[in-house]
Amino acid sequence: MTETLKKTSPQTPLDYLRRILLAPIYDLAVETELTTLSKLSLRLNNQIYLKREDQQPVHSFKLRGAYNKLNSLTEEQCIHGVIAASAGNHAQGLALAAKKLGIKATIVMPKTTPDIKVDNVRRFGGEVRLVGNSFNEAQAAAVEYAKAENKTLIHPFDDVEVIIGQGTVAKELLQQLPHADVVFIPVGGGGLLAGMAVYLKQLSPNTRIIGVEAEDSACLKAALAAGKPVDLEQVGLFADGVAVKRIGENTFGLIQEFCDEVITVSTDEICTSIKDIFEETRVIAEPAGALSLAGLQKYTQNSKGNESLAAILSGANMNFHTLRYVSERCELGEKKEAILAVTIPEEKGSFKNFCQAIGNRTITEFNYRYSGKPSAEIFVGIRLGGSVQERQQLLQGLVKSNYQVRDFTDNELAKLHVRYMIGGKSANSVEKNDERLFSFEFPEHPGALEKFLAAMGEHWNITLFHYRNHGAAFGQVLAGFNLDKSQQGEFFQHLETLGYQWQEETDNLAYQTFLN
């Protein structure tokens, strides 16, 4: 989705410009390369460039803003030290910047933070305090520690000095690519987008600036709709580097003035860009790091072509085990796989006939279980060439061959859970068909699943359960419960008190087709 931004009066743009030009960050930060993505350029009929912030000492642009902020502190503030709440790159950038300047840094991190990031903060000299299971809990603790210990709280994005530091990415980019047609910048709290946009628009006004958000963390899009920063009810955790519930106050004003557009992208599209970056550079970008390239690729689907397009690889602190999830999803993001439910006759030769119906296409996945009925439901993955049109042609061809087909390519429940559970239905074991299905998301840490089960309690009969650890910061469960009408009020009241993100999936077509 895209949305044109409302324009407002700028606030001291020349002052931002001057201070970005003079920002004293290069004692520690480095000028990163601008890499031409030649394969992608050919494929997308545009000149594609990637600004390589993975080359910073902490493998993220966050070092720029943190170092610029610490350079602005008074001597007294330096003596007392600094503190921040962060589950990721801000923590590492601040720890290294503080070490360089001889300032004591304390980082409050959720207990769910991957070990790689905790270890890196300690390696860079920061003191780590693990508090709570979410960023909000860590942030609240950091505020209290700052007051009690007279430490300076360093905000990850909504701080003028941080914004100025991040703006130095634009200074380098404009020197490396003076005539960019469009620049794509990832958005979490907005610090990078604000700093880059205020610089680029003043020196290269014809360059379009497009912010890119994850669909499930689109706090900028929500703020634009409301005309002011607002809180999202919840945010997705896959692209954890941009999982921010509220855009910054300082950043929002600059973004309104100097950014042209915002694009949102899906998890599958982000996974595709992680793969493309790896194939071009052999760098494994984190999900937030690949976000802007995903926006660029989405933009080219309806662009005129032959443009000079630049994206920011904002970070490469990937939890290695997350790659399993990425590899499963990237071909869906590339439109190179269709996930279908197809009804076939329960008779000999049916599978062979189906293979003939799809032509020369490769089957990537096939799930089936004998049911004893006249027809069978198969869950099948089919490789495509990379276009939505081809998927539609496949569906139309199967319908013409008298197959009943349902397209689950965009069905999140099917991709996350159902594909791993094909094998049987529970209608005979659930009395009066009172099964209700729910998906849950919770912070992933040792003992998290046990804690989830304990929180659910033993008052309701669980009829279905699927959990798969992707090595990420979040865990996802699909659970069915046998609930009669007398239990439903108490059950939903219990869900509201749990504190987990949940959604009912009882009417989801993938569930109705294969599991109900």
Image (cartoon, rainbow, N blue to C red):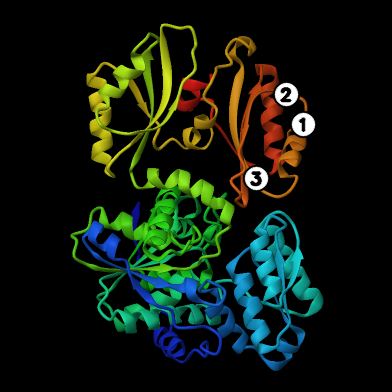
At numbered mark 2, what does the secondary structure look like: helix, strand or loop? loop
Amino acid type, callout 1: Gly
* Badge 3: residue crowd in 10 Å (few <14, some 14–19, many ≥20): many
Mark 3 → mark 1, Cα distance in angstroms: 16 Å
**Observer-nearest of 480 and 283:** 283
Do residues under tags 1 and 2 come within 8 Å of each other at their CB atoms?
yes
Q: CA distance from mark 1 to mark 2?
A: 8 Å
Q: Which residue is mark 1?
A: 457
Residue at coordinates 29% horizontally, 45% vertically from top-left? 386
Note whether residue 133 is visible. yes
The residue at which mark 3 appears reads as: 442
Is 275 positioned to the left or the right of 40 in the image? right
Q: Residue at x 53, y 71 (%)?
A: 59
The secondary element bearing badge 3 is classed as strand
Answer with the quarter of the image where residue 183 lies. Answer: bottom left
Please state if 81 lies on the left or on the right of 463 as rendered: right
Q: Which mark is residue 460?
A: 2
Q: Position of residue 419 (x, y in %)?
A: 49, 31
Q: Where is residue 153, by image quadrant?
A: bottom right
Dot 1: what SS? loop
Label 2 and label 3: CA atoms lie apart by 20 Å
Name the one closer to the observer, 276 or 109. Answer: 276
Can the viewer see residue 253 in this picture?
A: no
